[in-house]
Amino acid sequence: MKTRDKNRTSDAIVVGGGLIGLATAWELREAGASVTVLEKESPGCGASRVAAGMLAPIGELDFGEPELLAMNLKSRELYPDFVGKIESETGLDTGYRNCGALHVALDRDESGELKRIMELQQSHGLDSKWLGPMAARDLEPGISPSLAGAVLVEEDAVVDPRALVEALRAGLSGRGVRIEISEATGLVLEGDRVIGVETPAGTFGAGAVVAAPGAEAGIAPWLPEEVRPPVRPVKGQVVELGGDPEDPACQRILGSERVYIAPRPDGRVILGATVEEMGFDQRVTGGGIHELLREAYRLLPDVAEMEFLGATAGLRPGTPDNLPVIGRTEIEGLILATGHYRNGILLAPVTAKSVAGLIGGEEPGAIGAASPHRFEREE
Ligand SMILES: Cc1cc2nc3c(=O)[nH]c(=O)nc-3n(C[C@H](O)[C@H](O)[C@H](O)COP(=O)(O)OP(=O)(O)OC[C@H]3O[C@@H](n4cnc5c(N)ncnc54)[C@H](O)[C@@H]3O)c2cc1C
């Protein structure tokens, strides 16, 4: 290289302007580093644009992923301060609300499964509570009268990922962080060390590079094969409905076995989401929308009266064990921050803080189980 252009040299480059990349740039700047973000299309155009924004570490609990639960809980704990600082610096609302979640069983079979999940949650010392049909409808009068029971998780929260992306863009710009619309096409190496990133617009130099390209990480040609993580795209479709903020369709996140409904402060709700192994296909399909509307109607019949605002699809960055891939690689100075699958909005604060810490020489801490090296051990 070396680029002598001061405008093109920073302490760190973040490749990917999704929520993970932008949040990481924010925390790096907070730690005093100069940062450049490289985004090939527009910030927040990937999965972060589509996500419902549920911050539901407990609601999402499933068998076999205690490390993920620990990371999720840590990140939810960081959320209020994370968004609080962004909101106060920019004056923008991120849609963060500590609204709680109600997981509803619509028949006896679902009730058995929901009770099992609640017991699992409680065995982890988590706070969830069984409610009978009347108690559940007292909290959320719009839900189906034929429900069999529900689990209340008061600590679950929600954020509007698009609003959060916009606030982060404004906050980063206010802090002097440049977001270059340019595609990373290669790494510049000096021995075993990364010293920059190549783009069609020229080379950008930095002492550290954070790779946060979302679902494309597994096929990213600019990442040398030996450090490319086993990330695959997992398609998800969502439907957006408009409602009255003075008389919202629901106060909390509502979930059933087949659909969730995430409320927004302006009365909208997001219905999500399909989970489809379709490669990089991002088409919105009739079948996908039909399934979401049908299941949302079973859960909250009032959706029938809401305005249809649109439907979108996005690609979750999935990994073989559902844990993200965050950490140092064998290329010195290159850090991966991807593979967040269904929890990337929730995991943004812990990822961002941990990556900033790693670049500052700290140990992985809360994200230790997400190390990229775990896949090498499997070979
Ligand atoms: C339907 C759906 C619902 C979801 N709901 C939730 C939820 O409720 N809660 C939750 O926590 N998570 C949810 N998720 C998951 C969450 O959206 C993702 O985990 C998260 O957005 C991943 O963020 P990211 O920044 O890694 O990826 P992305 O948002 O996809 O961003 C990656 C960015 O990198 C850019 N890029 C890629 N390659 C390059 C390159 N070579 N050079 C420059 N830029 C590049 C892309 O253009 C893109 O902007 C959902 C996902 C989907 C699809």
Image (cartoon, rainbow, N blue to C red):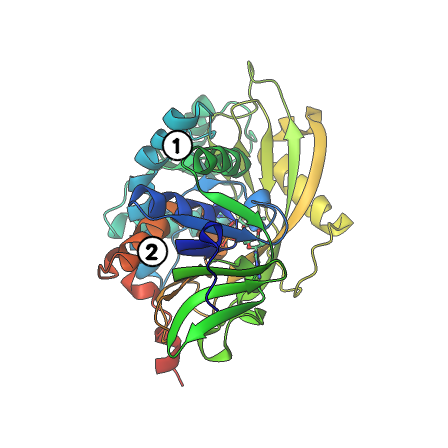
In the displayed structure, does residue 238 sit left or right of residue 25? right
**Residue 10 appears in the picture as rendered:** yes
For the point 60% across and 39% down, the residue is: 271
**Which residue lies most toward the top here?**
246
Query: Residue 191: percent from the left, percent from the top?
Result: 38, 79
* In the rendered image, the vertical position of residue 296 relative to residue 38, given as above or below: above
Position of 312 compared to 12: left or right? right
Q: Quadrant of the C terminus?
A: bottom left
Comes first in the chain, label 1 or label 2: 1
Q: What residue sits right under mark 2 in the picture?
A: 355
- x, y percent for residue 221: 58, 72
Place of residue 42 in the rendered image (x, y in percent of width and height, measured from the top left): 61, 46
Is 276 left or right of 365, judged from the image as shown?
right
Circle number at residue 121: none
Q: Can you identify the residue that label 1 sits on?
A: 86
240, above or below 183, in the image:
above
In the foreground, 297 or 77: 77
Q: Is residue 96 above or below residue 40?
A: above
Identified by mark 1, the residue type is Ile
**Residue 59 visible to an observer of this rendering:** no
Residue at screen point 31% across, 60% down? 67
Disc 1 element? helix
